[in-house]
Amino acid sequence: MTGTGFSRLRSPEPDPDTKQTTSGAGGGTAMRVIVPLQGVAQGRGGLVLGSVIPCALFYFLQFYLKRHRNEPKDPNSPASEKATGSPTQSPSQSAGQLTELPGLPRSLSRPLLSPRTAGGPVSLSGRANSILKCSDSPYDIGLIRVEEDPYDELGNPDGVIQLGLAENKLSLDLVKDWLAENAREAILGGGRRELNVNAIATYRPFDGLMDLKVAVAGFMSQVMEKAVSFKPSQLVLTAGATPAIEMLSFCLADAGNAFLVPTPYYPNFDRDVKWRTGIEIIHVPCRSADNFNISITALDRAFSQAKKRGLKVRGIITSNPSNPVGNLMNRETIYSLLDFAREKNIHIISNEIFAGSTHGNEEFVSMAEIIESEDIDRDRVHIVYGLSNDLSSPGFRVGAIYSLNENVLAAARKLTRFSSISAPTQQLLISMLSDTEFVKRFIEINRERLGRMYVRFVAGLQELGIECTKSNGGFYCWADMRGFIPSYSEKGELELWNKLLNAAKVNVTPGSCCHCIEPGWFRFCFTTLKEKDIPVVIERIRTVVETCKSLG
Amino acid sequence: PDQMGLAENQVITYRNPIHTYTYTYTFNSKVDSHLLIWLMQLCFNLIHEWLLKNPEASICTAQGAAEFRDIAIFQDYHGLAEFREAVAKFMGKVRRNRASFDPDRIVMSGGATGAHEMIAFCLADPGDAFLVPPPYYPGFDRDLRWRTGVKLIPVVCESSNDYQITIEALEAAYETAQEADIKVKGLLITNPSNPLGTIITKDTLGALVTFTNHKNIHLVCDEIYAATVFSQPEFTSIAEIIEEDKICCNRDLIHIIYSLSKDMGFPGFRVAIVYSYNDAVVSCARKMSSFGLVSSQTQYLIASMLADDEFVDKFIVESRKRLAMRHSFFTQRLAQVGINCLKSNAGLFVWMDLRRLLKEQTFEAEMVLWRVIINEMKLNVSPGSSFHCSEPGWFRVCFAAE
């Protein structure tokens, strides 16, 4: 335990503003699920009352207005004028169908003036405007550059090498082989003359076929080396981890509330957690001195500061293995986090999408393992998972929410209608994941390849004087390039990033994109490379860092 | 067991008399089962045949598996170019090539449900409203409102003029909103209509474009039943109106929602698109589509299928023919027992007039009648009130019921 004096046995003081709701086997403090979705989740009349009554009122008002207005009908104004100037409809035809706005010449392109719509540009939503206003981040720019000029050993040897996208191409061949042997049967059904229609037409339940849930639960178990047994009924499947995170955000917090998120974090959290939900992210800085591990002190400080600002914190989002650093959370840290969350009565979202992509000797511990034994925290921990990383198939769009909180599951289930997994893909994956032999082999070989690449790549960087933090998970390493930036600032960091992208033609992710509080750290993804590409990459980076040795 | 005598989880085997294939389906009464089974009966043997002839399209052969390497990794929110091109071409065909669609304006989303939500997120802020002429698909109340905070304002439409949308009614609804201090951001129309099965006339469409232009509000056209138009009058897409009326229309206000669920019988694929003439909306929607991307495997499969011109043309013709037959048979049977339906030429359902069967012209009486129909006649119908119909006594029924 860190020196904050929390004890697991201390009884929690509920936040005075939190409404106590009953929820399953939560015991102690109950978790509050946001009100609008609570109604939906509990099947109360929210939908009916919410729509019928306002509708009825509007009907009444409209009928009232209709009877009391005296609109002059102008049978001579054209029902519609063609640009070609063809003759207008005869009055008898148009009068029966619709009444035209009187006296409005068709050529008027300026919209009708009214206090609300005084001509001018078309207005979109605030969300749309915010996206359009912000310029591309280095993260985006890098991706675009690679797209435009991708490296190919033979075809385009001077192209940009991609080290900025956390994708794993190391073991695609294994999946390809499986498909070549098994996919036909998986999709078209057993026997050449029979077709399982469910493969094509089924679209309910929205949160995924039970067979797929069973398969995914089994896969998650295998990936975490059987330390946890995941119950399929506690899974909600989504079209990718991206909507899973957004859905959980909608379920656990209202617009204007906040989540604490340790930095550096995955750049797209800003989109997934904040964009459409209106929820804020409060950065909780992790430092190199702690090897970028979470500090409860920092969490506590951030929580207090938020409270002073009048921001209601609803939860913490942690990633384990973390992105971009690649740390694994140890048991002690997990217990400390749970204590903290319990004391503040907030949720924990544990993003474990790289759980199967670990390498080295450190033990991976899932939050699921801890909450299996800790009764009192069952309602507050929710795990996000997905097949994109561990199965190298981001294209298939398979994500999952695992929770023991029935309210959260119920609400999330209803939201999956907006992001369901495609039926043929469900069928394919049921087959693939049920092939436990294949899965076992895949996980083993993939881990081995991952470990090997990591060791080689990190060694390569070391040759250049670039040290990386110790990491045991993910597709990347977290490199210390503070010795190579022209100034100890974000600006200096971006200058180096620029040189790497444009002079060395290597796309890496600068720490500022991940909101790292210390400048000079970079994320290098090595899983889109082949082993023989490593020397090429190192040479390219060498050309830049040799000219950059500056700060003492 | 329901009217077709099917029990929950019963496995149904269909044997197609022409081909020697059989296919199985596990009955699930929670699904809109008759619609689904009927869709499958209608379309499936054609699709099945195609799938078997083209296994590489679903990455089932060694050749197809080689493609997989790129497909499995592909998660670009732009979507596969071949997919967008194939969908653009298909949309054009369905509209008898009287409108053409630009693949770069196609933005994917996970099903029509997701597409509706996405367009609401792009166009409106919480508290803003869309005008929606009833009767309308009940799902709108959920899809457009739940997470977006957007309101829906019904517009008066009456059976006396066959539920035509009138400018007068639109103006009244707009004014009501103004008086209640609610900002109207757009008008949402479904053409062909669910639940009515009717199409909006060209003139009315033109008038709607004019109305929305004048108010400077968006016009969102849900055209997911476009390929289910089986007889005259012909269907006019808003895309045709735009292409004709280049001068008087601000294209930045026009958006189309489309999906392959109904036209192709692929609800399980979760493929829908938002087609916008507004560049900013395309850009924003594309970024938002990350929350509901279509599986790359599915994109690939659909791209292959829709690129097969012969198959597509045959499919569209065959589907229309069967729909017409079913519709005619069904409406005739109803007429024989003295039940009239709204004259319709599209969709997979009819709008029945049961007003004279009501004890009194109230929605309570409608619910009483509905329970009788469900329990005693064992006919799966939906009461008009669930579609926000202003007059009691109307019911939507899908053709599959016999």
Image (cartoon, coloured by chain):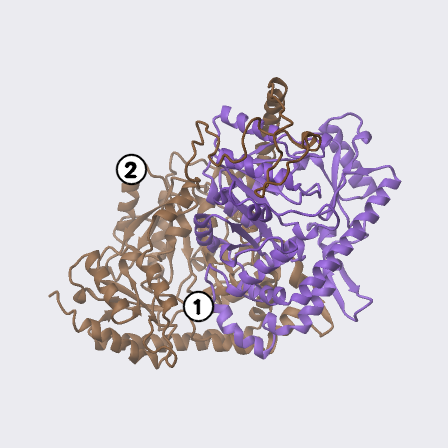
Image quarter hosting the N terminus of chain A: bottom left
Task: Name the residue located 44 percent from the left edge and 29 percent from the top edge.
Answer: A116
Amino acid bearing label 1: Gly
Along the line of sight, the residue nearer the viewer: B41 or A452? B41
Where is B241 relative to A506, above or below?
above
Q: Where is residue A511 in the image (x, y as percent from the top left)?
A: 27, 60
A273 above or below A445?
Answer: above
Front-lying residue, B87 or A343: B87
Q: What colour do you see for chain A?
A: brown
Q: In 3D space, how far apart are the residues under numbered discs 2 and 1 (Cα atoms)? A: 39 Å
**Secondary structure category for the residue under label 2:** loop
Quadrant assignment, res A151: bottom left
In percent of the image, x 81 and y 44: which residue is there? B378
> x and y percent of residue A291 in the render?
25, 62
> Chain B drawn in what color?
purple
**Closer to the camera in the image, A448 or A165:** A165
Residue B323 x/y as whole percent:
76, 53
Q: Which numbered marker is on residue B53?
A: none
- Left or right position of B168 against B361: left
Q: Residue B172's spot in the image, x, y percent?
A: 58, 26
Q: Is mark 1 on a helix, strand or loop?
A: loop
Q: Residue at x 72, y 51 (%)?
A: B35
Q: Disc 1 marks which residue?
A: A356
The answer, for residue A189, to whether it is visible in the render is no
Q: How many marks?
A: 2
Which three-letter amino acid code belongs to the residue tagged 2? Arg
Say which chain tag 2 marks: A
Badge 2 or badge 1: first in the primary sequence: 2
Provide the residue designation for mark 2. Answer: A309
